[in-house]
Amino acid sequence: MEMVDLSRIIYDGMPKIPALPDVHVQKFFSLEKGHPLNVTELSLPCHAGTHVDAPIHIMPNGKSIEELPLDSFVGNGTIIAVRKNGGEEVTAKDLQASGVEVKQGDIVMLYTGWDEKFDSPDYNLHPYLSVDAAEWMVERKIKMFGIDCITVDLPTPLRPKGFDFPVHKALLSNNILIAENVTNLGPIVGRRCRILAFPLRIRGSDAGHARIVAELN
């Protein structure tokens, strides 16, 4: 069995949505400074790096990340490829035309190739999911949708005043969890696999950082 890591390395100053706090990774204790051991301190918003969104992220009475059952984060899945330019939407028609079969209960990951721009300012102006594409997922009753972009919704620079995150609402209100900042999907496009996306158990949190892995037979 082959295992493919689909998660980002967390590091000091890593890219994140501009409105969020910066990511800090630093030594609290250091052998070099005479301490008896190394201890790393980590400070980052729950929506930086590879993470899974919980329903409470957009729904006032939704479940928080630690309230979700473990089977929400693991299951059979597949990877769909749709290439778009920054600011272009991925539609239901695009997903249908991919030729990849999506089954009820699947974890579906979308490869746009945008993960290659992670360290570039272009990462914030990414492809995004249309509402009808989200509804396509809802109709197929998948359990989780992941994307190799910073968010599934319209890029931050393009959002009008009063933007209400329609794709987050469409998915999370139908108990479809969202994984963002996924990476390394290119080599497994079209493959069926088992996907594990277990987030940290953070009390009351709207998301949890996750080590997402695809198991290939």
Image: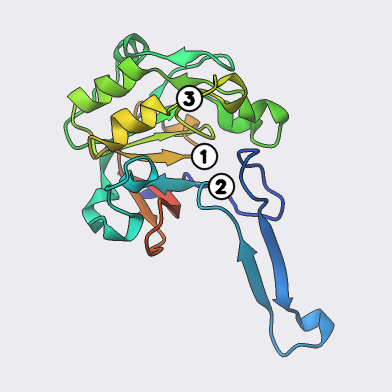
Location of residue 211 by image quarter:
bottom left
Q: Nearer the viewer, residue 104 or 89?
A: 89
List the single residue furthest toward the bottom: 36
Q: Nearer the viewer, residue 61 or 114?
A: 61
| Residue 192 locus on image (x, y percent) | 29, 34
Q: Is residue 4 visible?
A: no
- Image side of residue 125 versus residue 169, left or right: right
Q: Amino acid at mark 2?
A: Ala
Q: Which mark is residue 48?
A: 2
Is the Cβ of the residue at disc 1 closer than 8 Å to that at disc 3? no
Mark 3 lies on a secondary structure that is loop
Q: Which mark is residue 163?
A: 3
Q: Nearer the viewer, residue 40 or 131?
A: 131
Identity of the residue drawn at 39% across and 56% down? 199
Circle 1 residue? 181
Q: Residues within 10 Å of mark 3 (few under 14, many from 20)?
A: few
Image label count: 3
Q: Is residue 143 visible?
A: yes
Give the Cα distance between marks 3 and 2.
20 Å
Q: Is residue 92 above or below residue 178?
A: above
Q: Is residue 216 above or below residue 130?
A: below
Camera-side mark, 1 or 3: 3
Q: Which mark is residue 206?
A: none
Q: Amino acid at mark 3?
A: Phe
Give the Cα distance between marks 1 and 3.
21 Å
Mark 1 lies on a secondary structure that is loop
Camera-side mark, 3 or 2: 3
Is the Cβ of the residue at disc 3 closer than 8 Å to that at disc 2? no
- Image side of residue 138 versus residue 44, left or right: left
